Image (cartoon, helix red, strand yellow):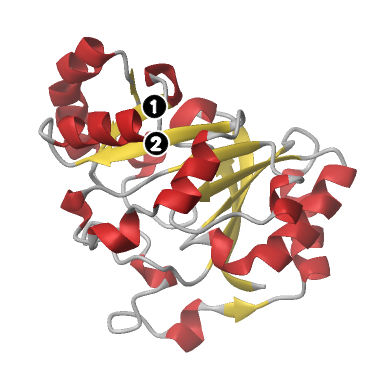
Amino acid sequence: MLLSEIFASVQGEGVSLGVPSVFVRFAECNLQCTWCDTKYTWDWAQFDRAKEVTDVPVADVLAQVVVLAETGTRNVVLTGGEPLLHQDAIAELAGALRARGFRIEVETNGAIEPTAPVCAVVDQWNVSPKLASSGNKTSARLRAGPLTTFAGLANAGFKFVACSPADVEEIRAIAATYAIAADRVTIMPEGTTPDAIRDGGRALVDPCRAHGFRLGTRLHVLLWGSERGK
């Protein structure tokens, strides 16, 4: 498994906000968001891949997760980068974790089709399609096949990063295109400082109320700023 880091914290985003979790962060990504706060997983122009990426056997990752979870954590979040670039490894690791009583969340940008073996071992999908403000081409960030699949999964929620209230109109259009109900949508402000999250969140309150979307936040940023491993 090509990994960036493994750590224990609480879920900072989405419908599982605040849940004690172990995070397994995969390296590499198929998109390049301008505002990405984990560029150390894929931007090899700015970061040294040899230092940032480790190839770890699945059995070793499993053992690390069990140790980090201790006795009070039963939630594991597979994140990135983009985890679905590593679907065979996910199927093996998630299957082994679920056999030990863990619950599995996978965070994905929604641009890669999930395989049946992976779908079978995921308890919750946190699908985060990227908007035009991310700087990615539409053809790369919004792919009809994968998004249709995720929209049809009862255990998939949709989490959007909004750089401004203007982004909410694009979110409405995506939700309408794929028949995603408003109560499955969480919108959170972009930012890597507590002030940016607070101010951005305030600006999103009225648009979320107007359209029935859930307003989210980035709890880890509010608590630790841009500190890694949190």
Residue 230 appears in the figure: no
Tell me which label, 2 or 1, sits earlier in the chain: 2
Q: Residue 33: x and y, percent?
A: 27, 61
Q: Which residue is mark 1?
A: 185
The quadrant of the picture occupied by the N terminus is bottom right
Seen in the picture, residue 67 relative to 204 is either above or below; the reply is below
User: Whole-Å distance between the Cαs marked 2 and 1?
Assistant: 6 Å
Verify CB contact (< 8 Å) between mark 2 and mark 1. Answer: yes
- Name the residue located 66 percent from the left edge and 56 percent from the top edge: 115
Q: Secondary structure at mark 2?
A: strand
Left or right: where does residue 65 sit relative to residue 35?
Answer: right
61 is higher (above) or lower (below) than 187:
below
Report x, y in % for residue 93: 77, 58
Q: Position of residue 118 (x, y in %)?
A: 70, 53
Residue drawn at point x = 59 percent, y = 70 percent? 3
Question: Mark 2: which amino acid?
Answer: Lys
Q: Residue at x 43, y 57 (%)?
A: 228
Q: Which residue is mark 2?
A: 159
Q: Secondary structure at mark 1?
A: strand
The x, y position of residue 170, in whole percent, is 20, 37
Is 7 situated left or right of 216 in this image? right
Instruction: Check disc 1: other Cα within 10 Å, few if <14, some if 14-19, many if 20+.
Output: many
Is the residue 86 above or below the residue 54 in the image? above
